[in-house]
Amino acid sequence: MQKISSTFLQWLLLIAIAGNTFAQTISVKGKVTSSDNGAELPGVTVVLKGSTLGVITDANGQYSLNISDNRGKLIFSFVGYTSQEIEIGGKTTIDAVLIPDVKSLGEVVVVGYGTQEKKDITGSVSQISTRQLEAIPVYNVEQALKARASGVQITQNSGTPGGRIEVRIRGGNSMIGSNNPLYVVDGFPISGGIEYLNPSDIESVDILKDASATAIYGARGANGVVLITSKRGRKRQKSKIEINSFYGIQQEIKRYEVLNSAQYAVVANEWLKNQNLPAFFNPSTLQGEGTNWQDVLFREAPIQNHTLSFTGGSETTTYSLSGNFYEQPGIIKNSSATRGNVRLNLNHDLNGRMILGVNLTMGRNELYRVPVDNTSFGAGAYSGALAAPPTLPVFDQNGLPTRIEQAYTFGALDMRNPVLYDRPRKDRTLTNSVLGNTSLEFKLAEGLTFKTLLGIEYQTAIIESFTPIIFSDDRGSASDGYAYTNSFLNENVLNYVKKINEKHKLTFVGGITYQSYMNRFANASVSDLANNITENYNLESAAIIAPPANGFSEWKLLSGLGRVNYALNDKYLFTASIRADGSSRFGANNKWGIFPSAAFAWRLSDEKFIKQIPFIYDLKLRTSYGITGNTALSPYQSLSRLNAVRTIYTGNTEVVGYVPGGIANPDLKWETTAQFDAGFDLSVLKGALGFTFDYYKKNTTNLLASVPLPTSTGFSTILQNVGEIENSGVELAMNATVMKKKFKWDVFAQVSTNQNKIVSLARGSDIIGGNLNLPFLAPANIARAGQPFGAFYGLQEDGLTTDGLVKYKDNNGDGTVNSLDRVILGKPNPDFIYSLNNTFSYQNFELNLFLEGVKGNQLFWATAGTFLNSYQRGQNQFADLYGNYWTKENPNPNAKYPKVSSATAAQVSDRYVKDGSYLRVKSISVTYNIPVRKSPWISKAQVYVSGTNLLTFTNYPGIDPEVNTTGTDSQSIGNRLLMGIDQGAYPSTKLISFGTRLSF
Amino acid sequence: MLSACTELLVEKPKNFVSPVNFYQNEKDAEGAIAGVYSSIFPLNGDSKNMDEQHSGYVTGRGSFTSFGNFDKVISSDQYGRIAGLWNGLYTTISRANVVLNRVPQIKTISETVRTRILAEARFLRAMAYFDLLINYGAVPLRTTEITDVSEVAAPRAPINSINDLIINDLIQAEKDLPETVGTGTGKASKWAAKMLLARVYLNKEDWAKAAEKANEVIVSGKYQLVTVAVPDDFYKIFASVTNSEDIMSHHSSVNRQTPFINWLHGAGTPYNRGTVFGFTILPNLNSPVFKNWSENDKRKQFNIYSSYVNAAGVTITLPATNPWLFKKFIKDATGNAIYSLPIYRFTEAFLVYAEASAMAEGKPSTLALERLNIIKRRAYGYPLTASSPVDFPSGLTLNQFRDAIIQERAYEFMLENIRWWDLKRTKLAKQAIEAATGKTFINERLLYPIPQAELDSNPGITQKDQNPGY
């Protein structure tokens, strides 16, 4: 709002000035662009120095000024940019390139329930612009935020198209509640995901990190808040059409090298020998490579993205309309992610006292999935391809996929030919989403506005699957499911700004909000299909029809909120906020939570003693403290419940029974996070170099924990608010304009640390993570007081026994090796994360180089438990095994791999704990601005080529160190503890893309 | 105002039943006991498979292979299955304890139904404790509904007190369970309780009582042996929903099937239309059980196969990789595993009587010998009550007689979860498994490890209490 109104004032001023320009004779004209992205800048004030003569650039950044004299200087000034003076020197065409003001005193930051000028901010807020969001081709907005802001760690589970992205702002606070930030899109707190948003549609993303910024979101603020503001038109903006398109090719970032046919035969024979069985292969007849199952599985996959947008505005109405299509087939066949999206933002000023607003986004997301992550043997497509014996052909003589699990007695029975995961098998989710809100803002009096907002978030999804009949003994299966969610929002917010004799500035925000949410789903699944023709479209024709499944849940949140900002002399800034949240999800004994915060900032650079230091341009010290909450509970979790089960007494007729689902806890409530933050914003060398530094410490108490019960109680866990986690860290971000002449070089860099530590746990006892999937079936992570959540936990190896099996250390010295000998083996959290973004520009060329990395974390390379386990169950192995295993002939106790035999079951040990540090050239791109100044109909034309993930420096032996295949938002502590696991991850991709950006 | 707002925030769930408004009437009581029965079904088949992997007459394959390494303690890749068995049994106990706590408080219920339901709960609890006892040894004893976290600590109780609870429960159940359940053999009758009591006494070597309970079942007149003329006649027992010798069994439906049958057969055989996992249980033809098995015993032809006739009428010989497979348990013509799996069969009463009475009396009585022979005659297709050429002779020593019974039980109850228990209780495990597999057997294998999750979270148990070897 403030941005618009300040522009409006400039207009008024300049319209008045323009009245004096009749008598002039010389015309100077030109175009003003931004150094940042070459975009034309409308609304720039161009004034002849020392006069009242001036104009404002039009929607294309063009201006024309009539002056009496071709001497003197023109001053170009614009909010958020450094003003520039240019000597006229007889020229009639003067173009100006304005450099964004790093200090950006006028820059507006979106905060909860309002906006603030950056100079007035007392909290810790990072802002990310559309240009950064667009830099890398991504499906999710979350991915676009990666490494763009300090204190924000973003990790993908794997390279699965449309796969899960984990966002952690200043570490994870919760053990089983969500650790994801609250997303607020154009004022609407989102209850689901944001995958239907088009990154190109976003004007800015403001990330609220400290309690002074987040406490206004109360029981949902503890994980940080991400405010997403979509693009909108500006008043009197000439209609603009933009096209933004790219097309690219993806390839797997790396592959595992597996045994070839000849090597496989040797290893299989060795296994048979060690099992006292006769050899099967005659290795001399099996030469060469055999089947390369990874070639069968992978494909080079195209990726494309197209956005078309229309923006503009009149005196009273502004609009922005855009459409988007994104398509990313996966590198593994039968997987893909597709998004279509239409967005409209419309604002209309009714009469100067009432402003109507509409924000509407409609999205369609389609995912095709194949099982890959967390699989071993044939349970997934990739593990299936890695396990498949290279000695076997892909198809048998009948043209059917070879039944690799039946080919050999010594082969693992749960192997599957990976082509079975290709079409016509189907696992598809189609989601339609609508996010809309309408608002009406009243200007009640000078400085006093009231805004009421009604919004709805609405999603429906079709979730369908079909497993065809391929072999004569296949039965086939199919399912069809529908999910429906909606969330209704009403917000009523009063805003009051009062200045008292330029010394005191007071801003007050107060409001009452109500949000409700409902979720329903229904699913039908069948097996033993009549044929493959009707797939999942005629379920009633199947022989076995499973009982229908459906679900219902809802929650309500009623809140009151208030915030006061007080600035004294623009130097001493105070903020206090409070929110009361009443949530249906809290237990009967704890329905209401109160969340206060306070902050103080001191603009030190306005003090005389600092002003004397010449190189300091701007300096602000900040500190804050506040309490936020996390509604970690799901609906009905505080209630006790009975579950329906079935049994059969007579014949084949089922009878329904009811059994207790657990032990109830009516005291359940939010998790409480108290956060302290202290930091400074420093800008030196006339704003060419800026730093933002923060130290924070968060203590989360009343942790919601599914406290393990001895399973002999009949239950595995009970839910309680117990325990404490601490996250602390420092964040340093730097902006610099290293060179700004003909050759320009801008740098953004950040480094962030976060130490996560469990302070206390229920009953002081460790919580052991859930079991890893096959082949481990044992936990690898632990929650233990004093350690980070999810620390790796297991045995330590001690060479091989005389029989060639792995020997483990008897760490407690009790003479036997058992679970008591498990020790902490590492941690999944990095010591620090860092990134460096360089933009070089020279004339019409621009080169962007974006590096990011993490340092000091470990990963549990569970993949090796299947594919480097000495052929334990007869699946193919990674090539590294060959020649490196223990043999009777060469009983080396330090052989890299144990004896090839069925006794070599993988145990959770330090063998699989690997350094996960990496440094990655995340993206490199070259952009060429086609000179289009002379074209009457095109105002900008860019072409670019970009490479993503082309180069990674790491010691990690798996495919990609950016991995967390077991990453989950589940409420099971066991599942949540499974952190930093890499089991058969869907490979990440490297991508070369070609794109263009056009404006008309 | 605030209270009105808070009223808005009260949750009214629509999609589940709350204990607050349940346990009110007879129908609820029936629902509660159905929940207990639900937990005994071998829904993943692991517990059945694990037993058979220890039988000696089986060779394991695939993910069950490592059970066969008898010279080592159970490999960690099986811990999930070991814990699954434990969790399942304690789920039954916990649900039974809820019934025993709640159902007596219900007002609207007929006393007959109440008595029967409480007896069923006691029976199912005893059944679960007996399985825990023979698989894990001493285990935590839980006899009340747990409603608070403060009640979770429980040490391993002495085996005697577990036996006492089992026997007390069963004596009560025996008294209160119905005389007959008709074709509803998914439910427990008085006779099921007697069968379990007989097993418990056999396990305790309380021979006289074991014989007494077995005898009561035999002479009850409730059950009859199925007549067998050709091997496939055994399918009247094993491919049926119930039959005249079914005392209690796991009933199935298309939506509740055990995968156990998948683990016996290869793909595409007529016994198993379609297979998810393929075979993991292969006959170990080198074991004495198979080597000494007469071809005239119709159970042999019935139990295993080396070829089959496919849908096109062509005889297919099983491949060299798995020349023989089991076929006692099969799916129906539509490929569904909906035949009932035996829990207690009438024949067991004969063999328990024979063994227990001989042990009690120090020598086999005529009746004991006759009852052993009845089972054998049936298997060879001879009339049950006339002496036959295959009869065991009189004059066997006690040891010879008992060995004959244990051998006969292997044939009669193959794949019915009897053999491993027999080997353990008769202390023959080491000898029999070494003879069958050629591998060394270590005694640590006699008990499964207590699951780690229990050790980690039960304050009453520490690692020191773990079974030997783990």
Image: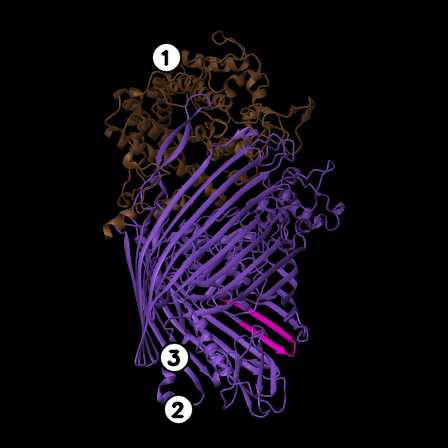
Chain colours: A purple, B brown
Q: Earlier in the sequence, mark 3 or mark 2?
A: 2
Kind of residue indicated by mark 3: Lys
Q: In the displayed structure, does residue B321 sit left or right of residue A696?
A: right
Quick check: B468 above or below B400?
below
* Residue A231 image point, x, y percent: 51, 64
Q: Disc 3 designates what residue?
A: A620
Kind of residue indicated by mark 1: Ser
Point out the stretch of residues depicted in magenta. A836-856
Among the 4 quarters of the image, the one containing residue A746? bottom right
Among the 4 quarters of the image, the one containing residue B120? top left
Front: mark 3 or 1 = 3
* Category of crowding for the residue at label 2, using alpha-carbon neighbours closer than 10 angstroms: few (below 14), some (14–19), many (at least 20): few
Which labelled disc corresponds to residue B220? Answer: 1
Q: Are marks 3 and 1 on the same chain?
A: no
Res A398 visible: yes
As measured in the structure, the alpha-carbon distance from the residue carrying label 2 to the one carrying label 1 is 109 Å
Please give the chain letter of the residue carrying mark 3: A
